[in-house]
Structures are given as C-alpha cells and as structure tokens.
Image: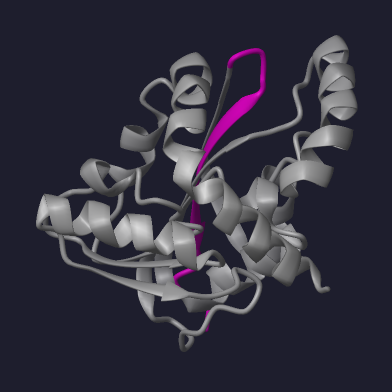
C-alpha cells in the first residue's frame, strides 16, 4: 500500500470525529490563526488539505475558492459545510504532491495544518509554487518543531506515535524550505513556545 493510499484510508476513518478532536487543539494553540491566514487571501484561491472546511468562515466573501484533499470523506464534510454556509467552492480529491492544476492558476495558496501530514513536504511546496501566478502569495499555518530543546525533545517522542497513527509530523518546519522552492518570505511569526508558525511568502513577479 502506498503512503497516499494509507493516508487516504486513515483520514477517511478520522473524518467523522475530526472536528471534535481538532477543536481543543485549536483552542490551545491556534488562537486566531485561521482568521489571520485566510483573511489575507485574494482572488483565485487554492486551499491545499482543505479537510472538513474549517477555514471556510474565515475567507473574504469575494475570493473564488478551490480546495483539494486526499480524503473523500473529509471532502464530503467540507461540501456539507459549504452548502450550509451558502458558499460556492470547488472541491476535488487530489494529492498535494501532484496538484491537478495548470501552472500559474491561482493568486493565493492556503495551507493550514496540512504540510505536517504530507509525506514529501518539499514536493508539496514546489507544487504550490508552480500553481501560483507571479507575485502570488502562499499563506501557511502549522505546528512546527519548537526552538526550545526540551519541548522539541518531547515533540520527537510524540512524533513516533503521531506519524504511525496519522502520518502527522511534529518537528517539521516549512520556513527553511520556502527559499529553495523559489519563494520570498515576507512575514514569519512563531508562538506557543515556537510550536506554532504563521508564514506569508510570495512568488517572484518574474517567475514563470
């Protein structure tokens, strides 16, 4: 079984309880993180790892939304949430490492709590760069490896369990990978003892 097949099955099983399980994590760690990220989205927006659509209430009303996720069960819940809100959104089952969109298709790419669960985060970031238009922005929110050694040690111990259960890495940090993918980081904020990071990065206006 491939990593993607295992993750799809795992998150299909997790989908019915995901909103309940993630709610306490958000209260503890994220504060206004979703609003901070999604409120900056503009134009044609792609959300990678849209999950159950928890970001939907946080987007400006005038953006045009597309979302992808590996799990059909999570996408079904996102469709229900969008319908209940009266919000138009195109939702597609897809792999973050192989986005099914042409080059330069979006003005903004959003990913919240998603890169921690992608087997190859470098490939996913490269795909985000590819589908962004020149001068487009990447908006990220994720839990990352803390800069405090005792906390990072504890994260490494927990990661042995979280990866085997959900494919969820606790010690990754996207920031160092963005420049390699061709992004210019415009803003970086860490909080909660360095465990949570918010990022704004831009694709060069001359990139193709």
Identify the residue shown where x is 42% and y is 37%: 19
Q: Which residues are magenta?
A: 192-208
Q: Is residue 152 visible?
A: yes
Residue 131 location (% of width, % of height): 48, 77
76 to the left or right of 10: left
Q: Nearer the viewer, residue 38 or 154?
A: 154
Q: Nearer the viewer, residue 158 or 41?
A: 158
Residue 143 location (% of width, % of height): 63, 33
Q: Is residue 109 visible?
A: no
Identify the residue shown where x is 88% and y is 28%: 156
Q: Nearer the viewer, residue 102 or 19?
A: 19
Residue 201 colored magenta?
Answer: yes
Could you say which quadrant of the image residue 38 lies in? top left
As drawn, 55 above or below 123:
above
44 to the left or right of 71: left
Identify the residue shown where x is 56% and y is 58%: 12
User: Which quadrant: the N terminus?
Assistant: bottom right
As drawn, 142 above or below 167:
above
Residue 88 colored magenta?
Answer: no
Residue 127 location (% of width, % of height): 60, 73
Identify the residue shown where x is 43% and y is 81%: 104
Residue 135 location (% of width, % of height): 41, 66
Q: How many marks?
A: 0
Could you say which quadrant of the image residue 147 lies in? top right
Q: Outermost residue, bottom direction?
A: 102
Q: How is the image coloured?
A: one colour
């Amino acid at each position: 079984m491939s990593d993607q097949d295992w993750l799809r099955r795992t998150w299909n099983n997790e989908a019915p309880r995901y909103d309940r399980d993630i709610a306490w994590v958000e209260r503890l760690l994220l504060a206004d993180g979703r609003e901070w990220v999604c409120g900056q989205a503009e134009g044609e927006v792609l959300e990678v790892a849209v999950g159950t659509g928890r970001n939907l209430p946080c987007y400006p009303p005038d953006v045009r939304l597309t979302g992808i996720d590996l799990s059909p069960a999570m996408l079904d819940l996102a469709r229900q949430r969008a319908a209940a809100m009266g919000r138009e959104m195109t939702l597609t089952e897809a792999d973050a490492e192989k986005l099914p969109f042409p080059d330069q298709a979006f003005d903004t790419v959003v990913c919240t709590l998603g890169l921690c669960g992608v087997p190859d985060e470098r490939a996913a970031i490269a795909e985000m760069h590819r589908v962004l238009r020149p001068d487009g922005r990447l908006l990220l929110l994720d839990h990352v490896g803390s800069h405090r050694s005792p906390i990072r040690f504890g994260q490494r111990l927990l990661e042995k369990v979280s990866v085997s259960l959900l494919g969820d890495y606790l010690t990754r940090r996207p920031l160092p990978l963005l420049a390699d993918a061709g992004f210019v980081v415009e803003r970086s904020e860490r909080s909660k003892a360095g465990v949570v990071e918010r990022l704004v990065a831009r694709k060069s206006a001359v990139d193709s």
